[in-house]
Amino acid sequence: MFCAPSVSLTEVEQRFLEAAEYGNIPEVRRMLHHVPNLNVNAVDYMGQNALQLAVANEHLEVTELLLGRADLSRVGDALLLAISKGYVRITEALLGHPSFRDSRRLTASPAQADMFDDFYAYDEDGTRFSHDVTPVILAAHCQEYEIVHTLLSKGARIDPPHDYFCSCNSCNYQQQYDSFSHSRSRINAYRGLASPAYLSLSNEDPVLAALELSNELAMLADIEKEFKNDYIQLSSQCKDYVVGLLDLCRSTEEVEAILNGETSSEHSYDDVGRPPLTRLKLAIKYELKKFVAHPNCQQQLLSIWYENIPGLRQQTTGVKLLVVLAVAIGLPVLAVAYWITPSSRVGKVMRSPFMKFVAHASSFTIFLGLLILNAADRFAGTTLLPNMTHHQQPGASQMKCFYPSVGMIWAEVKEIWSQGPGEYLVEPWNFLDFGMLAIFLASFSCRFSAMKHADIAQTYVYKHNKTLLQLPPEIHYFTQARIYWLPSDPQLVSEGLYAVAVVLSFSRIAYILPANESFGPLQISLGRTVKDIFKFMVIFLLVFLAFMIGMFNLYSYYLGAKQNDAFTTLEESFKTLFWAIFGLSEVKSVVINNGHKFIENIGYVLYGVYNVTMVIVLLNMLIAMINSSFQEIEDDADVEWKFARAKLWFSYFEEGRTLPVPFNLVPSPKTILGLSMALKSQLLQLKEKCNASKTEIQLTQVNTITQSTQKQKCLSSTSPTRYQKTMKRLIKRYIIKAQADRESDEITEGELKEIKQDISSLRYELLEEKSQNSETLDGLLRRLGDMSSSKKPKEKPLKQ
């Protein structure tokens, strides 16, 4: 039983444990020095020895006395206990023990340490910590900055866990032996790595480390579903850490250091003098919305957004609208000016992200206007009826939008080339662009095909008009009215694809809505609604398919024996059930004329269950999902909108793509110069490879370059860079703030307990001092008594 100790304690051991527990320093010192064969490793009923009791009650002097014994055990358990309670001075005293001269003591967990020594308690009730926790992991868990710094200075580190799909021998053995312990050890390691204390003190670039770790933890949350909440919490902890650092910035230099990261002087800015914002790109990629929407980050983005036109930033909305209108009207003139002189003042203004956004938005708006004008001749109806012969070349009016479409295709090709296919496919809007342009391209291809065949037929008629008595069928086809055209006619296919492309083109305008504070959250809610609909479609299609097949099997034998053709074919079954969702199907669709009441009743039941399931249950569930998504966006509308706006702005921060559609089809002198320089460099490299005589020069150049780089590395290793100095200041502020917040949140009960223990130790010290003083006083009194007794015989003869 628990109440029965495995080994009974002697009276001396019991008194020794009590003295260590209550901080009786004189008694512990006396027993250590004067009691022979004292068992300092004796344990109480909870399995704790004197060292653990002294550490648990924060008796530093007792701990130092016990550490003087060479045969002391469970030093590792005492260290973990001191770290968990945040006793810095006791932790430092324990780390000074000779057993920690072996550096492996700090890196190995109790499960990895030698099982035959007494450094840890290996019995199940002997330790209160997990067997996979190392001292530095525990210190990181407890957010003990000073202890983490001490352990890191002694060489302790947290090893990152292996990949989840790792198939090494160690991982395979742990998975087979105890998969739960293996998963818990991974979580404990990640909890230590994600600790703000460990991130601040162990990484040269804590911002990059936190960003990468947050993304890794978010991916693990999707892989290890059973520990999803733990990984999501740790990922959020890393994100909050980065936001906390950004919140402590006091100057533009510090904000730029966090957003840009450590960059060399050569590559710190691009050709237009714009910061790279590498860390901010990672934050957008990993969706750190609070970091991107932070006021310090938004202020930096806003200054870049109005680059080269700073006066426009302070203007009113009306002035900005007038500027947008002026740019839209004078877009051809501005494009020609930039094409001729890209480095002039006008060219610099055109390279501004704001002006690029206005130019591209104006160009796309004009393109939408052309789509509307293409159908202007048919607004009041067409005079050419379907049964009349078509005398106009097919698709001539729609060809006005061909060149803008080609310009957009060229812009997408350049974007794929610059970003790469992987990055291009991550953005959902790129799928819409690709689909829209692919449908436009297919539509124009079909129109060109129809025009080509019509021209061939017309040429044939002109060539044989004198000898031709009757047109061949393939030529006569082009003289027929629309109602006689084949369903696969290229003209009909082109018109259908063109209609779909027009719808997608108008939906593409939602891409620029995040630029406005009012329409941005609505656009975000619309995107979230589309995701909810796709999730809902899985259940919807299963139910719909089940009833469609069931109703078809029920009524497929009654074609012509019903009041209508509903459910008699698979197509009719689909149409009837689909329009029944919107209340456009009739109840008589299940009625049979020949009196088969059983089949008819089954049809009534199935049709009623379908309507109840789809209309009442599933549609209301979809409405609830949409309301929930909208409420989530609305609750955090400012952060969601600023994050979406930052993504929109970033697409215009990159160098290039200055000229909008269709002006981008004309190669500018800047593009020609860039291509010529690239070709020149390629030719020079080929020439250097062919000339063997220049190899020695190349080797000397390589040697000088390596020597210079080594010198730079030596200088950088000796003197910290500007980025390192800035991050050091921010880390100091973060640690001071974290410690101040922790001190303000301390529980008064713990402080009272600490005071009580100090008073108890002081009591024993005063008692010891009192006993020593009383012994000294007794000695003095005895000496005085002896002296007085020796003087009395000498005085008696004088009296006589």
Image (spheres, helix red, strand yellow):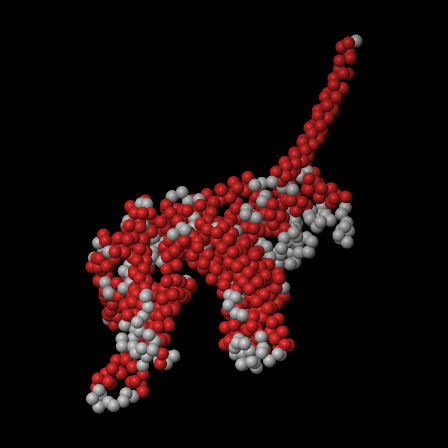
Farthest residue to the right: give it: 800
**Quadrant (top left/top right/bottom left/bottom right) for the C terminus:** top right
**Quadrant (top left/top right/bottom left/bottom right) for the N terminus:** bottom right
Residue 607 picture location, percent across and down:
58, 70
Q: Which of 32 and 249 is in front in this view?
A: 249
Residue 743 left/right relative to 782: left
Residue 720 left/right relative to 390: right
Residue at horizontal 31%, vertical 50%? Answer: 321
Residue at horizontal 33%, vertical 47%? Answer: 317
Residue 694 left/right relative to 487: left
User: Can residue 126 be spotted in the picture?
Assistant: yes
Q: Nearer the viewer, residue 582 or 737?
A: 582
Residue 26 picture location, percent across and down:
68, 37
Residue 62 sits above or below residue 505 on the image? above
Residue 222 picture location, percent across and down:
53, 62
Residue 335 sits above or below residue 743 on the image? below
Residue at horizontal 26%, vertical 63%? Answer: 663
Residue 520 picture location, percent across and down:
41, 54
Q: Nearer the viewer, residue 734 or 470?
A: 470
